[in-house]
């Protein structure tokens, strides 16, 4: 299943914000709010990766292929 443009744009925005927070972390300690935002973005990325892996596995099972 392909993701729509909304999800691609959201993921790109999340990637940019994670990069911004990483740059800020180098310059100074993050605020509590920034750390919470960073944790939320990391959790969202983990979920996206997990969902992609699940889709790949389901597709492999549907076609009789092997998974890792």
Image: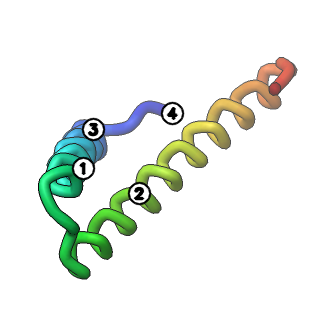
Residue 4 % position (x, y) = 30, 38
The image quarter containing residue 52 is: top right
Residue 27 shows up from this direction: yes
Q: Residue furthest bottom?
A: 32
For discs 2 and 4, the disc positioned in front in the rendered view = 2
- Rate crowding at label 1 as few (under 14), some (14 to 19) or many (20 or more) other CA atoms within 10 Å: few
Looking at the image, which residue is at 65% across and 31% down? Answer: 56
Q: CA distance from mark 1 to mark 3?
A: 21 Å
Colour scheme: rainbow
Q: Earlier in the sequence, mark 2 or mark 4?
A: 4
Q: What numbered label is drawn on residue 1?
A: 4
Q: Establish if 6 lies above or below 40.
A: above
Q: Mark 3 or 4 closer to N-term?
A: 4
Nearer to us of marks 3 and 4 is 3
Foreground mark, 1 or 4, reads 1
Q: How far apart are the two marked residues, 1 and 2, measured between alpha carbons?
A: 12 Å
**Which mark is on residue 44?**
none
Are the residues tagged 3 and 2 within 8 Å (C-beta)?
A: no
Residue at disc 2, secondary structure = helix
For the residues marked 2 and 4, what is the alpha-carbon distance in whole angstroms?
Answer: 23 Å
The residue at which mark 1 appears reads as 22
- Kindly check if marks 3 and 4 are in contact, taking CB atoms under 8 A apart as contact: no
Q: Which residue is mark 2?
A: 42
Callout 4 crowding tier (Cα within 10 Å): few <14, some 14–19, many ≥20: few
> Which of the marked residues, 1 or 3, is nearer the chain's N terminus?
3
Residue at left offset 46%, top offset 61%? 43
Percent x, y of residue 3: 38, 37
- Return the residue nearer the eye: 8 or 13: 13
Residue 66 percent coordinates (x, y): 86, 21
Which image quadrant for residue 2? top left
Label 4: which secondary element: loop
Q: Crowding near pointer 2: few (<14 within 10 Å), some, many (20+)?
A: some
């Amino acid at each position: 299943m392909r993701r729509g443009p909304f999800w691609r744009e959201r993921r790109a925005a999340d990637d940019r914000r994670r990069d911004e927070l990483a740059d800020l972390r180098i310059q100074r300690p993050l605020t509590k709010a920034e750390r919470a935002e960073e944790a939320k973005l990391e959790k969202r990325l983990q979920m996206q990766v997990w969902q992609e892996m699940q889709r790949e596995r389901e597709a492999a099972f549907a076609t009789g292929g092997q998974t890792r």
